Image (tube, helix red, strand yellow):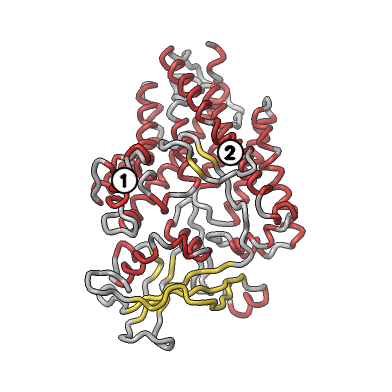
Amino acid sequence: MEWFTVPDYWLSRLVFQRALAVVYLVAFLGAARQFRALIGERGMLPVPRYVARVPFRHSPSVFHLYYSDRFFAVWSWSGCAVSAALVAGLDRHLPLWGGMVLWLVPWVLYLSIVNVGQTWYAFGWESLLLEVGFLAVFLGNDEVAPPVVVLFLLRWVLFRVEFGAGLIKMRGDACWRKLTCLDYHHETQPMPGPLSWFFHHLPKPVHRVEVAANHVTQLVVPVLLFTPQPVATAAASLMVLTQLWLVLSGNFSWLNWITIVLALSAVEFPAAPPRMPGPPLWYEIVVLSVAAGLLVLGYRPARNMVSRRQVMNRSFDPLRLVNTYGAFGSVSRVRHEVVVEGTSDDVPRADSDWREYEFRGKPGDPGHWPRQFAPYHLRLDWMMWFAALSPAYAGPWFTGLVERLLENDPDTLRLLRRSPFPAGAPPRYVRARLYRYRYTTWRELRETGACWHRTHVREFLPPTRLERGGQSR
């Protein structure tokens, strides 16, 4: 079948595969470095407790069969090794079936992690990585030209990511329709970056232009992905530029980067294709069968996208083969932050020596300028932002965090930028307070050097200590 492959996209496939492997590597690295405190045997939401109550069919994962922290470490570091091999292009030196198996490995490894990750892995970009990673299995290597149906499915995912995000904005917060959301967003987003302060202080007319351009990029440009070249390449390139603008304005894990990776698969690079043999019959059958199955499964996310009750970031099957995406359907007008403090005093009083814990990415000390972490995902910092929105988000895990701070748990402390208590002297009490944060003005920045100003709002958690048995009270 001559129509089955498109040799002109051989370089697009190569760039897409190497970039996707880098995203996989970042994802596995974050899992390996953070899991013990989050979902380990003594974590805030332990995997063994989760798999004991959730059946395998609802969350397929190897950890239903066996779990230990050592096994999880080997599993996640193995994902790093396989991802690094894919970055280096090992799949190009294998037979076609071997390259497909190699691409299947990180998908299986990461699916097992996400499906037991609970709250810490309930982000849209986790499912997006898995959906895109599954399609990459069938994209082939140097033995065949890229299959047109897989390239189409990649564009379909990109369309759903962008168009779905555009629709959720237009149906959600009125500020998107009034073009005013960016008057607040750069200040109230989950994890500001080093340039976010400057983005916030752009003139309001510039913010209006940004929002309008976002609507065009998400609601008009995605349709052009399905037009002939060079229009499709121009559309994908515009998406890349928009995502790079978002990369500069905040820390959104690898959401922007995997969207860029998807867009690159639609770009037709001006390079003459090498000679490649025709695809074997078994490969055509496998690819077409998988594509047909995914199109059938894709009915539900497509229906959700056009529904008036559209939901964001939901998977429609336990293997996360098809999902719905979207972000910031509503935008906070005020930024609140949970500040966690500890004291060594025997009796906690308002005038006790309360010392603040510093997180790596979320705002804390008003004088501490945000750093760039994306595409690396600081899971605890992100969930602290949700906790500030509502204590309900913190219910399952915040008590566990406090208990581990009271123990000076080394795995938990490694997630932080700084603990105010030495290793052998944990705090006697820990408390949490809610603050209102705002960006300083240009004048305040010149006078104080601080990018934030904060005001105490209320108590979030009263002074808490450990009882016998390690329970906090």
Tell which of 306 and 325 is nearer to you.
306
- In the displayed structure, 173 sits above or below 87; it is below
Q: How crowded is the residue under tag 2: few (<14 C-alpha within 10 Å), some, or many (20+)? A: some
Q: Count how many numbered circles sit on residues in the image.
A: 2
Instruction: Specify the quadrant of the image occupied by residue 340.
Output: bottom left
Circle number at residue 304: 2
Between disc 1 and disc 2, whose residue precedes? 1
Farthest residue to the right: give it.
205
Residue 55 lies, in percent from the top left, at: 32, 41
* Mark nearer the viewer, 1 or 2: 2
Circle number at residue 306: none
Circle number at residue 77: 1
Viewed as shown, does residue 224 lie left or right of 153?
right
Does the image show residue 248?
yes
Viewed as shown, does residue 173 lie left or right of 457?
right
| Quarter of the rendering occupied by the C terminus | bottom left
